[in-house]
Image: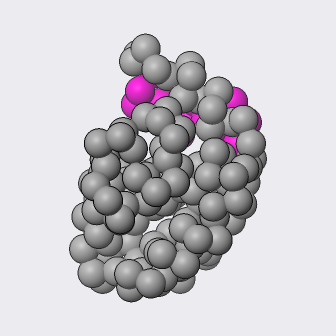
């Protein structure tokens, strides 16, 4: 079994899509190992997305991610990272496959409903950023 990190982003929480997204997560076989609703500060969002600091979208991304509550999750399944990325779909909802979360719930490349780790190392950092070890039993 593998664990990955996921976020239901502020746009999806604000539009009340969180319950439907969580139902889809469980329906495809993930076990939710940890879950919390948070409202990141701008500084917390900047720390989380530090790898993108030099990119032109960094300011808009961190403004968006600190604009309202989001739900952070630890998901577990066989090949969880790939499975979650497949369920999310392409970053741009317009290019995402039918049946993916971003196609169904995303509005744009900037407001695309979900985030997910892209590699085991990224998952380890992201899980550690939001969850203490005791929370990930």
* Quadrant assignment, res 27: bottom left
Residue at 35%, 40% (x, y): give it: 94
Quick one: 16 or 46, which is closer to the camera?
A: 16
Quick one: 95 or 12, which is closer to the camera?
A: 95
Image spot of residue 62 (x, y percent): 59, 29
* Quadrant assignment, res 2: bottom left
In the displayed structure image, the side of residue 90 where residue 62 appears, left or right: right
Q: Is residue 121 visible?
A: no
In the displayed structure image, the side of residue 40 where residue 3 appears, left or right: left
User: With respect to residue 53, does 123 lie above or below?
Assistant: below
Residue at 48%, 75% (x, y): give it: 24
Quick one: 17 or 75, which is closer to the camera?
A: 17
- What kind of secondary structure does the magenta stretch mostly adopt? helix
Image spot of residue 118 (x, y percent): 30, 51
Q: Which residues are magenta?
A: 40-53
Image spot of residue 75 (x, y percent): 45, 73
Residue at 63%, 64% (x, y): give it: 18
């Amino acid at each position: 079994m593998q664990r990955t990190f996921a976020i239901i982003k502020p746009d999806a929480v604000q539009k009340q899509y969180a319950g439907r997204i969580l139902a889809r997560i469980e329906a495809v076989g993930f076990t939710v190992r940890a879950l919390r609703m948070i409202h990141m500060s701008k500084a917390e969002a900047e720390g989380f997305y530090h790898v993108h600091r030099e990119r032109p979208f960094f300011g808009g991304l961190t403004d968006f991610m600190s604009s309202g509550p989001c739900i952070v999750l630890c998901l577990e399944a066989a090949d969880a990272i790939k499975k979650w990325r497949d369920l999310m779909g392409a970053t741009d909802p317009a290019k995402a496959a039918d049946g993916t979360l971003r196609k169904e719930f995303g509005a744009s490349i900037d407001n695309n409903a979900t985030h997910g780790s892209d590699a085991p190392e990224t998952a380890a950092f992201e899980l550690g950023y939001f969850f203490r070890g005791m929370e990930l039993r």
